[in-house]
Image (spheres, rainbow, N blue to C red):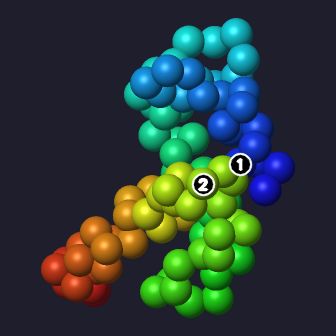
Amino acid sequence: MALQQYILLCSQEEAGFRDKPGKRRDHYHTCYVLSGLSVCQHSNTKDADSPPLPRDVMGPYSNLLESVHPLYNVVLDKYYEAYEFFPRA
């Protein structure tokens, strides 16, 4: 919860996220900050199909982000779609 609080209070800027206070927002940090926020929100779920509890989301539950694959940095639906599409050696 502390990481979510830092992200929302210190990294958030209107229309994007930044690396740290004093820096400008950019697409790169917005992408990775949102991914980190999603991982934080979904880290206590036991099953990928079950949503996190409201206590695991900082602020209103409408702040909930889609779950992302922590290694590939894409939403899980797209990860599973690509996994099924591409043949494995």
Q: State which quadrant residue 47 falls in.
A: bottom right
Q: Which residue is mark 2?
A: 60
User: In the shown orientation, is residue 78 left or right of residue 71?
Assistant: left
- For the image shown, how many numbered marks are present on the structure? 2
The answer to which of 61 and 84 lies nearer the viewer is 61
Q: Nearer the viewer, residue 58 or 47?
A: 58
Q: Quadrant of residue 22?
A: top right
Query: Which callout, 1 or 2, points at the residue further toward the start of the chain?
Result: 1
Q: Is residue 33 above or below residue 20?
A: below
Res 64 seen here: yes
Is residue 71 visible in the rendered image? The answer is: no
The percent position of residue 42, horizontal first and vertical second, equals 61, 70
Q: Amino acid at mark 1?
A: Gln
Q: Is residue 87 left or right of residue 12?
A: left
Q: Which mark is residue 4?
A: 1
Question: Where residue 8 sits: x, y (%)?
Answer: 66, 37
Decide: few, some or many residues near mark 2? Use Cα within 10 Å; few <14, some 14-19, many ≥20.
Answer: few
Distance from disc 1 to disc 2, alpha carbons, whole Å, reads 12 Å
Q: Is residue 62 above or below residue 10?
A: below
Kind of element beneath mark 2: loop
Residue at 78% over, 56% down: 1
Q: Residue at x 73, y 68 (%)?
A: 55
Q: 78 and 54: which one is in front?
A: 54
In the foreground, 62 or 41? 62
> Would residue 11 appear left or right of 67 to someone viewing this image?
right
Quadrant placement of the C terminus: bottom left
Residues at marks 1 and 2 touching, judged by CB atoms closer than 8 Å? no
Amino acid at dot 2:
Pro
Picture quadrant where residue 85 is located: bottom left
- Secondary structure, mark 1, is helix
